[in-house]
Amino acid sequence: MELPLSHLILFCLLLFTTGRVSPEYTRPGPRPLISRQHNGSESDPQQVHISLAGKDHMRITWVTSDKKVQSRVEYGKSPGKYDGAAGGESTSYQYFLYRSGKIHHVKIGPLEPSTTYYYSCGGHGPEFSFRTPPGSFPVEFTVAGDLGQTEWTASTLAHIGSKDYDVLLLPGDLSYADAQQPLWDSFGRLVQPYASTRPWMVTQGNHELEAFPIIYPHGFEAYNARWQMPHQESRSTSNLYYSFDVTGAHIIMLGSYADFDSSSDQYGWLKADLSSIDRKVTPWVFVLIHAPWYSSNLAHKGEGESMRKAMEKMLYDARVDVVFAGHVHAYERFTRVFDNKVDQCGPMHVTIGDGGNREGLAMLFESPCPSISVYREPSFGHGRLRVVNASHAHWSWHRNNDNDSVVADGIWLESFASSAACKDVTNLLSKSPNDEL
């Protein structure tokens, strides 16, 4: 008997969608785009976000329509009482007929760890506050990729904000503006309640490219102007890749859409950055990319393969603990792996491109499930990485179950710095410049 087309489609979905989902879970459908408008004056700050900017410093970024507002931040430990002040720089850009507002970047510090600071941007508008990361363990990271600005994005952000954390890591695809520049402004307003209170550290995805032949051949015009990361502080020549330290962790943000072959600046920078790591100071090493090096999802299959071949050995030799990726709109966790095989001295790979984008979920996985894939599920959500001490951390993935956030996957990790089986390279990286090799 010939099956109706609708039955065949359902059969194919069941065949390929083999993520482990609890049987009582009914996955909600897509949700529409949302837009955030600026309700203040032209001088009032909007799209406020903060990012780590070298040891004990924070970069405050905001936008004003009024081009006369000074790039100046006042700050202190009590509301309305500012004993610190710093000036910075500003930029703007034009993309075809669109002209951005004045984009302010001000670096403040030195700051004390685990301390709440109150700050004012440009002498106008409301007061904001943020808390600096702790000076010692434990520290908690939130990880969310491919955010966009749909009602699912708002749900993910609400779940993230409902529990405390220290730093948010975003492996690419922020606004999904895709050359519609006002969407960058709307995205900045959407994330401001969260990004103005905790540092957001981001890397670029394909939706940030926005290249156009001859006129904007290099792309990333809006991304580089709006989301300035500490590349200079980490001796990188490009805002598309950089690194930073926070509370015993060294975090490397790589550029999937910057040159990465062995002759590239990024390759040379990564090699130097990895060699500078002191595992006695930062026993944990995490890497973020956009296009996954490992994925059993049919979406974007193989797009990270050339970068994997170019750089994987460096990460393996440096004993990187975890590699986080976005791009694929689903969640998937792999075991420790190297060169497509289980390897207990390789990093754990996690795809977490499920923040809430407008393109929907990547529903189709390979069948059967490859042995290196431990958990996979096409649902929106976010992850939390709680680094308890120098040797142990806990990773968990939180599914957006409509209005609730449900922990669907989790695992305890042991750092390579404390692993007896994989200490050959980490011992070398832990030596100070004065140690004998």
Image (spheres, helix red, strand yellow):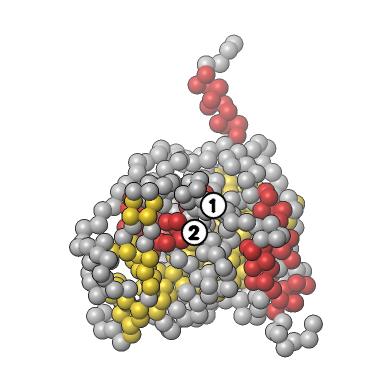
Give how far across and how far down residue 161 sits, in percent: 38, 61
- Three-letter residue code for mark 2: Leu
Between disc 1 and disc 2, whose residue precedes? 2
**Across the whole image, how many numbered discs are drawn on residues?**
2
- Three-letter residue code for mark 1: Gly
Disc on res. 170: 2
State whether residue 11 is above or below residue 385. above
| Most distant residue in the right direction | 437
Q: Are marks 1 and 2 in contact (CB under 8 Å)?
A: yes
Residue highlighted by disc 1: 326
Which quadrant holds the C terminus? bottom right
Give how far across and how far down residue 228 sits, in percent: 45, 66
Please name the residue shown 62% across and 42% down the image.
301
Please name the residue shown 65% across and 44% down the image.
302
Which quadrant holds the N terminus? top right
Please name the residue shown 68% across and 54% down the image.
308
SS category of the residue bearing label 1: loop
State whether residue 57 is above or below residue 300. below
Could you tell me if residue 159 is visible in this image?
Answer: no
SS category of the residue bearing label 2: strand
User: Which sits in the foreground, 418 or 101?
Assistant: 101
User: Which sits in the foreground, 81 or 383?
Assistant: 81
Give how far across and how far down residue 412 sits, in percent: 60, 63
Left/right of residue 325 with respect to residue 345 in the rendered view: left
Could you tell me if residue 177 is visible in this image?
Answer: yes
Question: Could you tell me how far apart the alpha carbons at marks 1 and 2 are, in whole angstroms?
Answer: 8 Å
Give how far across and how far down residue 431 sits, in percent: 72, 82
Please name the residue shown 35% across and 81% down the image.
86
| Most distant residue in the top direction | 1
